[in-house]
Image (cartoon, grey):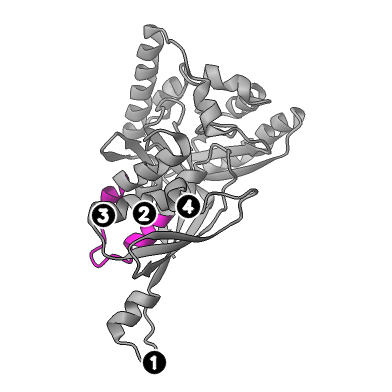
């Protein structure tokens, strides 16, 4: 929207006052079998970014609200800011952006909080371009932003936020995977923090070749099950034999929470992203909702309050507001 002001030309008014806001949902990263390459959005919680087009050729962060402690306001040190810097440089834009970030995702939760700010900023700023890009074309800029937070260029959270639904995210491509609309995901977030960098440090060391083979087979079963709408294939494959065994000890109450989800009929359950949140897939919303208090009770027994969300696996991604 543009508003003309006294003494200004319409074009100048547009450049001076144009702004857009976007919301990006949280996400379930890795989905147990797709470390750094597979994820899906989570309805009900997310980050919002408002972007303004400014004449100065720079990226500014005017405010960050909703974070429990101060986050970097320097663009290059902030995921959202770094993504917009990458966009500006790649497109050689003669103008810049000023953004405000409203955090709705808990930090260190395993729900893709850094990625959500990054994607929301890109979607909002993209709407202000003279010729907006496709969501796929925004992906490289999102990777540049995510690298600031995690130290790596991985798209398991970014891809589903950009496209919606279950997404396979490689280094340079996003592929949306069909999922039956009745399948739902439960995510339970205990009131605890696990920093992404610490969770990644737990993965250092060697791995047995047989475990890579088993994980590849499990990923194949899950993808095949999604394409075919065959829950039995997903049940056979939705098991993490590589990452979960090394990260689970960092999450108090994890084993009991996972067991509660499986006992309630989940097709599979594991750590969401870097943790400490736990997710599980179910064949219906009713089963997921029935399992939520049981998983929360498991965390309560470990001394943690928690929040729970249920959403379709094939959930929408980021939207303009």
Return the disc, 2 or 1, that comes first in the chain's sequence: 1
Q: Which mark is residue 84?
A: 2
Residue 296 position within the rendered picture, expressed as x and y whole percent measured from the top left: 68, 35
Alpha-carbon span between mark 2 and mark 1: 31 Å
Q: Secondary structure at mark 3?
A: loop
Q: Residues within 10 Å of mark 1 (few under 14, many from 20)?
A: few
Kindly report which numbered mark, 2 or 3, lies closer to the viewer in this rendering: 2
Residue bearing the label numbered 3: 134
- Region rendered in magenta: 121-139
**Eye-nearest disc, 2 or 4:** 4
Q: Alpha-carbon distance for marks 2 and 4?
A: 12 Å
Name the residue tied to disc 4.
74
Of badges 1 and 4, nearer the viewer stands 4
Disc 2/disc 3 C-alpha distance (Å): 15 Å
Side of 132 relative to 157 (left or right): left
> Where residue 20 sits: x, y (%)?
41, 67
In three-dimensional space, the C-alpha distance between marks 3 and 1, rounded to whole angstroms, equals: 35 Å
The foreground one among 144 and 229 is 144
Q: Which residue is mark 1?
A: 6
Dividing the image into 4 quarters, which one contains the N terminus?
bottom left
- Magenta stretch contains residue 58: no
């Amino acid at each position: 929207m543009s508003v003309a002001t006294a003494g200004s030309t319409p074009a100048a008014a547009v450049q001076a006052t144009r702004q857009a806001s976007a919301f990006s949902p949280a996400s379930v990263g890795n989905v147990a079998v797709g470390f750094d390459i597979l994820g899906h959005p989570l309805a009900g919680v997310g980050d919002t970014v408002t972007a303004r087009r400014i004449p100065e050729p720079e990226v500014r962060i005017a405010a960050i609200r909703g974070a429990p402690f101060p986050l970097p306001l320097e663009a290059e040190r902030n995921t959202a800011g770094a993504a917009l810097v990458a966009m500006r440089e790649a497109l050689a834009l003669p103008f810049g952006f000023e953004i405000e970030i409203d955090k709705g995702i808990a930090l260190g939760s395993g729900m893709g909080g850094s990625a959500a700010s990054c994607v929301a900023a890109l979607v909002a700023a993209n709407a202000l371009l003279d010729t907006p890009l496709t969501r796929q074309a925004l992906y490289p800029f999102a990777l540049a932003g995510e690298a600031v937070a995690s130290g790596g260029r991985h798209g398991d959270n970014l891809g589903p936020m950009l496209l919606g639904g279950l997404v396979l995210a490689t280094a340079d491509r996003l592929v949306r995977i069909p999922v039956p609309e009745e399948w739902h995901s439960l995510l339970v977030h205990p009131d605890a923090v696990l920093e992404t960098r610490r969770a990644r440090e737990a993965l250092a060391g060697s791995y047995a070749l047989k475990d890579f083979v088993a994980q590849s087979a499990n990923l194949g079963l899950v993808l095949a099950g999604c394409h075919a709408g065959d829950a039995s294939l997903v049940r056979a494959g939705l098991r993490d034999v590589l990452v979960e065994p090394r990260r689970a000890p960092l999450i108090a109450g994890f084993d009991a929470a996972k067991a509660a989800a499986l006992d309630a009929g989940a097709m599979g359950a594991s750590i969401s992203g870097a943790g400490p949140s736990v997710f599980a897939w179910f064949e219906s919303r009713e089963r997921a909702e029935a399992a939520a208090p049981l998983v929360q009770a498991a965390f309560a027994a470990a001394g943690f309050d928690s929040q729970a969300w249920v959403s379709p696996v094939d959930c929408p991604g980021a939207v303009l507001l």
